[in-house]
Amino acid sequence: MKLSNLKEFDKINFMEKKYGEIAIEEAQLEAWDNPYPDRDYLIEITFPEFTCLCPRSGYPDFAVIKISYIPKDKIVELKSLKLWLNKFRSRYISHEAATNEIFDALWNLLQPKKLKVVADFHPRGNVHTIVTIEKP
């Protein structure tokens, strides 16, 4: 639809970023202090609505991101993680690059005892990709 065809109210709404878009754009991963640093325990996080764009075709890619880690001194704040992961939705990035970027960001932020990131991408063109990165 051409912008000239929109009513004046719709033009303003169309052009302004919504508060959620701004929150995602400004998102930074945040770490909190581990409340039980003297104990080993496993944290498992599933993000079932991950999206990014294929760098070759521009088609959307959809994945379930599974993060599991044993914290040392820090844990990830969940809202910051959710917003930060949503930053990928408009990026042209391969499955492998996205998974590695998520892993590296969490590893550098948390310095956990163990971290595993699994990106299970939905089939597209009859190809199903799962990328797994793990570091003890």
Image (spheres, rainbow, N blue to C red):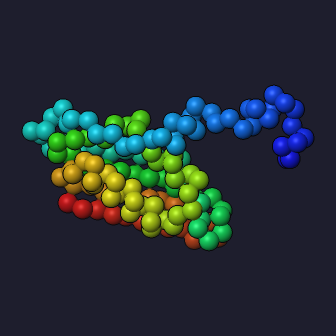
**Count of all numbered marks drawn on residues in the image:** 0
**The quadrant where residue 33 appears:** top left
Q: Is residue 76 visible?
A: yes
Q: Position of residue 25 (x, y in %)?
A: 52, 43
Q: Position of residue 13 (x, y in %)?
A: 74, 32
Furthest residue to the right?
A: 5
Q: Position of residue 8 (x, y in %)?
A: 84, 30
Residue 40 vertical position relative to residue 59 in the rendered view, above or below: above
Q: Is residue 132 left or right of residue 5?
A: left
Please give the name of the residue rendered at 58% of the width and 31% of the height, measured from the top-left corner: 19
Please give the name of the residue rendered at 21% of the width and 51% of the height, measured from the top-left corner: 111
Q: Is residue 110 left or right of residue 103?
A: left
Q: Is residue 81 visible?
A: no
User: Is the C terminus in the top left, top right, bottom left or bottom right quadrant?
Assistant: bottom left
Residue 35 vertical position relative to residue 95 in the rendered view, above or below: above
Please give the name of the residue rendered at 25% of the width and 47% of the height, measured from the top-left corner: 110
**The quadrant where residue 53 appears:** bottom right
Viewer-proximal residue among 77 and 124: 77
Viewer-proximal residue among 68 and 12: 12
Please give the name of the residue rendered at 66% of the width and 69% of the height, measured from the top-left corner: 57
